[in-house]
Amino acid sequence: MIDTDCFIDGHVVKTADTFDVLDPSTGQVLAAVSRGGKAEIDLAVDAASRAARNWARLSARERAQHLRAVGDALSARSEELAMLESKDTGKPLAQARADASVAVQYFQFYANAVEQFFGDVIPSLPDVIAYTHQVPFGITGHIIPWNYPMQIACRTFVPALAVGNCAVVKPAEEAPLSVLAIARIAYEAGLPAGVLNVVPGLGIEAGAALSSHTGINHLSFTGSVPIGATIAAAAAANVIPVALELGGKSPNIVAADADLDLALPVIAKSIIQNAGQTCSAGSRLIVQDSVHDEVVDRLATIMGRLTIGAGPTDPDLGPLISEKQRGRVISMVRAAQETSDLRLGSADPLDREGFFFGPVLLDRVDPAAQIAQEEVFGPVVAVSGFSDIDQAAEIANGTDYGLIAAIWTSNVTTAHRLADDILAGQVYVNTYGAGGGVELPFGGFRKSGFGREKGFEALRAFCETKAVVIKVPR
Ligand code: NAP
Ligand code: MG
């Protein structure tokens, strides 16, 4: 059974209108999903407000027990969730399995973390006791993209719930199914009604209604820069905080002294994962001149051997999410081809049903070119050269983004200098990503957004700090 309707206050809520969710590997309709709008968002915010009174009053330990129970229930159904995510997004099954496992880890990590989440006692005057409380905002709104629905939804709402907020979630139009399933499974696992509500629908309808709702006290948005700016404006109008997790143009920097056997498979994976539709995709490769040709030759060989197919058949590369997304990738590769060396692939779509697009490696790319500046969100890597590490840092920092970066070197000075100079929320040395990394703060510099998710930082982000000062006369 596929969940296709709003999940509000512990109930399935159907709407008069539906929208079609497609299977990207065939282009055929996978499900007709309730098209939530203002009315359903109103219902969800009301339900969350009622639930928040009790939920926020539970002890951290009681909330942690609820989260552990949901984590266990999701873990028991992880294969089913992974298959659903793979069908809905087109991503290879092994990657969807990893996402299901990370979703469970959010429940486990924040159940443990919230039990160790304390305020401070602040030294002040001799006759004064001052301490801080971490107070939940109340009702949090969460707007989710289509590329990692299950993982990103849990990344944002689980810490919000852990500290005592109740949530309203708007999943992406293209891939809402796993988030709807999680809401039901969580309720069946004992999460009280109204604590987690999910309203699928269109961005301009359900998304806009959620982000402008006066009953929402905090917004978390993961998605593109222009929509992020719209959400920030809506938050400003209601004077509520907003966390923005936006795009990236993340570089892998390969120094001449790098261990290429270690580096190249990871670099390939960083751009191929989820067909390049990853905010932290390693979409730029910046290589020191003396190893440039060897790196490009070897990467072209790895990328040329990838298997391509529907997500559930677990290929290396699945389809892109939609025809529209593929059209964008095609036009960007066409433009880039004019001014760089196309070393692998083509700007043409693959000749099969669905939204498939093969891997592309573009070499000798001008770091100022569109393909090196803007997110492609496809399996496309742009290679540029550098001579010394100052130039590498300059190129790495030469976009509007600053989400993540990786440095491949065996020289400790190069590693530290670049880690220091690069403007990014996460910097990796001789690795890329950290297996989900639920414990690592994650978020962007510059137009990659602001606010941090994951780790203990997310618990603080979903609270307001209240300072209490008590005079104790002697
Ligand atoms: P998007 O178009 O910005 O959409 C994100 C979400 O916002 C969707 O749920 C969308 O609904 C909704 N939305 C659209 N218009 C809205 C409006 N006017 N008001 C309220 N909500 C609205 O992004 P996407 O195409 O789904 O995702 C790709 C982007 O997300 C990329 O730029 C990627 O880098 C970024 N991303 C960032 C991170 C990160 O952690 N930094 C992670 C993943 C993805 P619809 O689905 O109906 O359009
Ligand atoms: Mg889909």
Image (cartoon, helix red, strand yellow):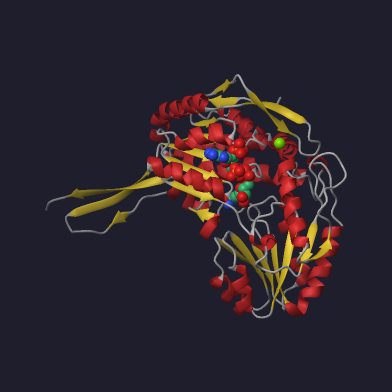
Answer above or below: position of 32 versus 428: above
- Give how far across and how far down residue 204 sits, in percent: 55, 35
Answer above or below: position of 386 versus 473: below
In front of the other: 187 or 247: 247
Q: Is residue 403 left or right of residue 97?
A: left
Q: Is residue 3 left or right of residue 190?
A: right
- Ligand 2's quadrant: top right
Question: Which quadrant would the N terminus be assigned to in this image?
Answer: top right
Query: Is residue 322 in view from this perspective?
Result: no
Residue at the left extreme of this rendering: 474
In front of the other: 62 or 388: 388
- Give how far across and how far down residue 144 sits, in percent: 58, 41
| Residue at left offset 79%, top offset 58% | 360
Q: Is residue 353 left or right of residue 465?
A: right
Tell me which corner region of the image, top left, top right, bottom left or bottom right, holds residue 150: top right
Tell me which corner region of the image, top left, top right, bottom left or bottom right, holds residue 290: bottom right
Query: Is residue 247 in view from this perspective?
Result: yes
The count of marks equals 0
- Give how far across and how far down residue 392 sits, in percent: 64, 74
- Give how far across and how far down residue 56 sits, in percent: 40, 35
In front of the other: 193 or 203: 203
In front of the other: 352 or 62: 352
Answer above or below: position of 330 versus 146: below
| Residue at left offset 26%, top offset 59% | 123
Q: Is residue 58 left or right of residue 442?
A: left
